[in-house]
Amino acid sequence: MDATPVVIGQEWSQPETMLETQEEAVEWVVDGEFSNGFTEFRKLEEPLEVDGEV
């Protein structure tokens, strides 16, 4: 199964945390802002199927 890790919160705990998410390919939603990868993920046209179910 493919999985996309996502950080969601109101603010970054440390200034360098945002850089670490980029290095580790982690998407994020923080303080109403979205990473580019998270925005692209939300644009999927087809629903994902798991074991034949949507």
Image (cartoon, rainbow, N blue to C red):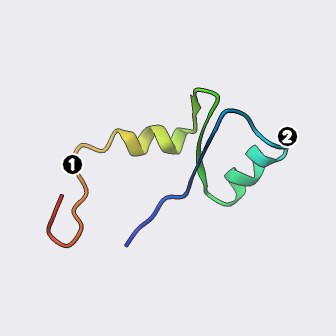
In-image side of 1 versus 29 (left or right): left
What is the quadrant of the N terminus in the image?
bottom left
In-image side of 29 versus 52 (left or right): right
Disc 1: CA contacts within 10 A as few (<14), some (14-19) or many (>=20):
few
Residue at coordinates 74% horizontally, 44% vertically from top-left? 18
Nearer to us in this view, 11 or 19: 11
Q: Secondary structure at mark 1?
A: loop
Residue 48 in which image quadrant: bottom left
In-image side of 13 versus 4 (left or right): right
What is the quadrant of the C terminus in the image?
bottom left
Residue at coordinates 46% horizontally, 37% vertically from top-left? 39
The residue lying furthest to the right in this view is 15
Residue type pointed to by label 2:
Pro
The percent position of residue 46, horizontal first and vertical second, equals 21, 48
Which of the two discs, 1 and 2, labels the residue nearer the N terminus?
Answer: 2
The residue lying furthest to the top in this view is 32
Q: Secondary structure at mark 2?
A: loop
Q: CA distance from mark 1 to mark 2?
A: 36 Å
Residue at coordinates 51% horizontally, 45% vertically from top-left? 37
Residue type pointed to by label 1:
Glu
The mark found on residue 38 in the picture is none
In-image side of 14 versus 52 (left or right): right
The percent position of residue 29, horizontal first and vertical second, equals 58, 38
The percent position of residue 11, horizontal first and vertical second, equals 72, 34
Disc 2: CA contacts within 10 A as few (<14), some (14-19) or many (>=20):
few
Q: Number of labelled discs?
A: 2
Q: Is residue 46 above or below residue 42?
A: below
Q: In this rendering, which labeled residue sits more in front, label 1 or label 2? A: 2
The mark found on residue 15 in the picture is 2
Residue at coordinates 34% horizontally, 38% vertically from top-left? 43
**Residue position for label 1:** 46
